[in-house]
Amino acid sequence: MTPIDEASWIRSLRAIFGKGMFAAVGPRQRDDWRLDALDIMRLRTDDPRGWPKLAVAPGGGNYGTVPENPFAAVTPDDFNAAFPVSRRGAEQIMVTLQGEWFQTEDIPDFDMREAELTSHARAILERFGGGALFFTNAVTAREDPHADMFGREGVYEGFTSHVMDCGVIAVSATEVGIFWGFTID
């Protein structure tokens, strides 16, 4: 695994995430990573490396704190709908966040861009190291964490009040990352 630096992190975030997306990392401070994830979702913590986050609302504004933040109502119990997913599956889900309905057919020129987009997703997740765990709300992972997430059905356990939301939670011994997309109508 190649260590990622800040410049690579920024380049890959910009390549994968756009408006209506959320990408932020915070420190892992508790045994129950869900509590750390909530702090990150609610923008209550800073990246431990000082690297930038992206919390861009549909229309281009920044997600603020309550009530604008889509994760404002999330509780620790909501993480029961976060299913383990393989690293490869997490990479695939991060790529599909570019599609309006989180499917590859909604990504312009996907066939030509698949390798590039997957490379950026891989670079982002490399930050968390080889022992990281990954979770998603894509229901396909509940049945098979090693399934092809490019070919999954579009069923999700929503975390927010948006029409649809999907994402990846990355958990290492020292950091937690939240990478999420939203469909608003």
Image (cartoon, rainbow, N blue to C red):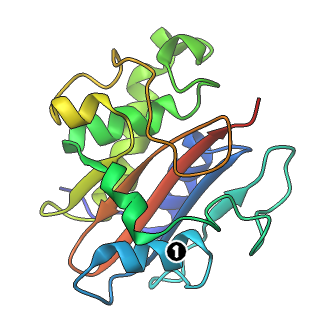
Q: Which residue is mark 1?
A: 40
Q: Residue sitting at 52 percent across and 74 percent down?
A: 40
Number of numbered discs overlaid on the protein picture: 1
Using the image, determine if residue 133 lies above or below residue 39: above
Using the image, determine if residue 61 lies above or below residue 108: below
User: Regarding mark 1 in the picture, which secondary structure is present there?
Assistant: helix
Q: Residue sitting at 33 percent across and 32 percent down?
A: 139
The quarter in which the C terminus is drawn is top right
The residue most toward the front is 77
Using the image, determine if residue 118 lies above or below residue 73: above
**Hey, which quadrant is residue 63 in on the image?**
bottom right
**Hey, which quadrant is residue 175 in on the image?**
bottom left
The quarter in which the N terminus is drawn is bottom left
**Hey, which quadrant is residue 55 in on the image?**
bottom right
Q: Amino acid at mark 1?
A: Ile
Q: Residue sitting at 61 percent across and 66 percent down?
A: 73
The residue most toward the bottom is 29
Picture coordinates of residue 162, whole percent (x, y): 68, 42
Q: In the figure, is residue 20 to the left or right of 129?
A: right
